[in-house]
């Protein structure tokens, strides 16, 4: 159940064809009342949220009830009323089968208060109960979910705070009756889903069962090119699956997997995850796997894979036709180490920005040439950039002083033009090309996992 929340009249001009439920936020735009006659084909929720619960309405209880009662002749309307009203008015004078009893709390998480609100609402047997709760941690989100799911009646639950987006993306698996979406730029709280986001995900808006997985990382996951790549493939091939951006704090990653393993619906419908740094190293260790990996295939047996190796091997094969003898690898992380392993039959030189990490590399790779001072006279047939330099449009050569090389493998990819590509032209292998090689392997393994789950 996806509810498209409208906060101004212009948003009514282009309602997606798949939308069934609308919410009209009268507290944000009184003019919306003038459009009710044109919305008879939709199920409409009328909301006039008080200021203390995150809205802008200053109407008294009697004024709000008077307004809602004036609209009762329209059969497609339901009315969102705060549970707090029940403490002051015993009889609302409205059929509760047309009432959504809601509570929005920005106060610290309190299980006893949530239970009290649910008990107050249940007594009246409303159309449904909506609870929006600020959660400051993943642990609080889990406690909120566990509390909501002790009640037999379906509840529309919404989390506000750090993990708001995660809860909304996984609302079906976490037992919520639905979630709210808005047009981009009209968000009223952190983490609201937008129409543009929802439309990326096939099967997201219906009630059919689908497999889920995604990219685990920091804030950069929202702009990953993989979000479009995998979801478009799923949609075009009618595969019941979605690939989600999963922004998880590093200190919460063990708790995130505990949530999945303890939730039957999450566990049984998960196919796997792509991993970004630092999770390529930390997540495998959680499952007693020693190798750095960028892919976790979920199942009763957890399988790890490094498709970055496939990408490097494919590019190495491509470069064999060129006269390459000596290689500079720039970087000190897992990708630099993988490049060393793949290109070990060449003459390799290592360098990076961090002198501390270079010292660690010097101990780890005793037979490699490792330099911490770049001479302008140094020349390399191939330079492999395993750092993030270039992602924000900065010049690799100006930042490092390294500018004498013939071929380049440049792992960063960005929405902006990367100067390094302009320097070498056709002798440049981009991060997007590298990503395409490794993503093809990931897609193959994801699809195998999805098919196995279906069986």
Image: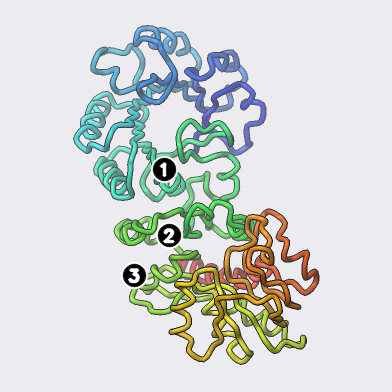
Mark 1 secondary-structure assignment: helix
Between discs 1 and 2, the one toward the N terminus: 1
Depth check, mark 3 against mark 2: the one in front is 3
* 55, above or below 128, in the image: above
What residue sits right under mark 1 in the picture? 164
Determine if residue 238 is in view.
no
- On screen, residue 138 above or below 184: below
Who's the residue at 25% across and 13% down the image?
Answer: 88
Q: Nearer the viewer, residue 134 or 240?
A: 134
Residue 286 is marked as 3
Q: Where is residue 36 in the image (x, y as percent from the top left)?
A: 57, 17
Is residue 40 visible to the viewer in this orientation of the structure? yes
Q: Which of marks 3 and 2 is nearer the N terminus?
A: 2
Indicate the quadrant where residue 325 lies: bottom right
Q: Where is residue 443 in the image (x, y as percent from the top left)?
A: 58, 68
Disc 3 is placed on an element classified as helix
How many other residues sit within 10 Å of disc 1, few (<14), some (14-19) or many (≥20)? many
Tally the marks: 3
Q: Do the residues labelled 3 and 2 touch (CB within 8 Å)?
A: no
Dot 3 or dot 1: first in sequence order is: 1
Q: Is mark 2 on a helix, strand or loop?
A: loop
Q: Residues within 10 Å of mark 3 (few under 14, many from 20)?
A: few
Residue lying at 54% horizontally and 74% vertically, measured from the top left: 335
Lateral position of residue 302 relative to residue 377, left or right: left
Crowd rating for badge 2 (residues with CA inside 10 Å; few <14, some 14–19, many 20+): many
Residue 326: percent from left, percent from top:
67, 87
Q: Where is residue 372 in the image (x, y as percent from the top left)?
A: 55, 76
**Image position of 242 (left or right of 110):** right
Q: Distance between the residues labelled 3 and 1?
A: 25 Å
Q: Mark 2 points at which residue?
A: 269
Question: Which residue lies at the image location 69% right of the left edge and 67% below the top edge?
Answer: 397
């Amino acid at each position: 159940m996806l509810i498209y929340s409208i906060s101004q009249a212009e948003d009514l001009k282009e309602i997606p064809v798949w939308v069934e439920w609308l919410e009209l936020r009268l507290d944000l735009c009184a003019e919306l009342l003038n459009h009710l006659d044109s919305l008879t084909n939709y199920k409409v929720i009328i909301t006039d949220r008080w200021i203390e619960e995150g809205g802008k309405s200053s109407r008294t209880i009697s004024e709000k009830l008077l307004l809602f009662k004036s609209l009762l002749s329209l059969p497609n309307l339901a009315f969102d009323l705060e549970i707090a009203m029940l403490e002051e008015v015993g009889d609302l004078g409205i059929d509760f089968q047309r009432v959504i009893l809601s509570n929005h709390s920005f106060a610290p998480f309190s299980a006893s208060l949530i239970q009290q609100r649910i008990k107050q609402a249940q007594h009246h047997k409303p159309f449904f109960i909506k609870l929006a709760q600020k959660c400051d941690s993943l642990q609080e989100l889990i406690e909120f979910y566990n509390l909501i799911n002790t009640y037999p009646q379906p509840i529309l639950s919404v989390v506000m705070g750090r993990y708001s987006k995660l809860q909304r993306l996984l609302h079906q698996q976490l037992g919520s009756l639905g979630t709210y979406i808005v047009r981009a730029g009209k968000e009223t709280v952190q983490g609201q889903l937008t129409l543009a986001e929802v439309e990326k995900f096939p099967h997201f808006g219906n009630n059919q069962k689908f497999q889920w997985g995604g990219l685990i990382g920091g804030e950069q996951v929202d702009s990953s090119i993989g979000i479009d790549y995998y979801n478009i493939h799923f949609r075009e091939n009618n595969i019941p699956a979605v690939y989600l951006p999963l922004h998880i704090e590093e200190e919460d990653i063990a708790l995130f997997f505990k949530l999945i393993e303890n939730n039957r619906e999450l566990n049984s419908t998960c196919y796997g995850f792509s991993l970004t740094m630092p999770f390529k190293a930390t997540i495998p260790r959680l499952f007693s796997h020693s190798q750095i990996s960028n892919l976790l295939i979920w199942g009763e047996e957890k399988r790890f894979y490094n498709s970055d190796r496939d990408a490097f091997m494919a590019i190495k094969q491509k470069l064999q036709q060129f006269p390459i003898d000596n290689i500079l690898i720039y970087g000190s992380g897992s990708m630099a180490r993988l490049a060393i392993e793949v290109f070990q039959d060449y003459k390799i030189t290592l360098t990076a920005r961090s002198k501390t990490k270079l010292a660690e590399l010097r101990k780890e790779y005793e037979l490699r040439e490792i330099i911490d001072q770049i001479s302008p006279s140094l020349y390399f047939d191939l330079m492999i950039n395993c750092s993030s330099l270039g992602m924000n449009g900065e010049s690799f050569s100006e930042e490092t002083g390294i500018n004498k090389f013939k071929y380049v493998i440049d792992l960063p990819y960005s929405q902006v033009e990367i100067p390094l590509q302009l320097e070498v032209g056709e002798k440049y292998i981009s991060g997007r090309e590298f990503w395409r090689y490794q993503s093809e392997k990931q897609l193959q393994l994801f699809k195998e996992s999805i098919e196995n789950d279906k069986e």
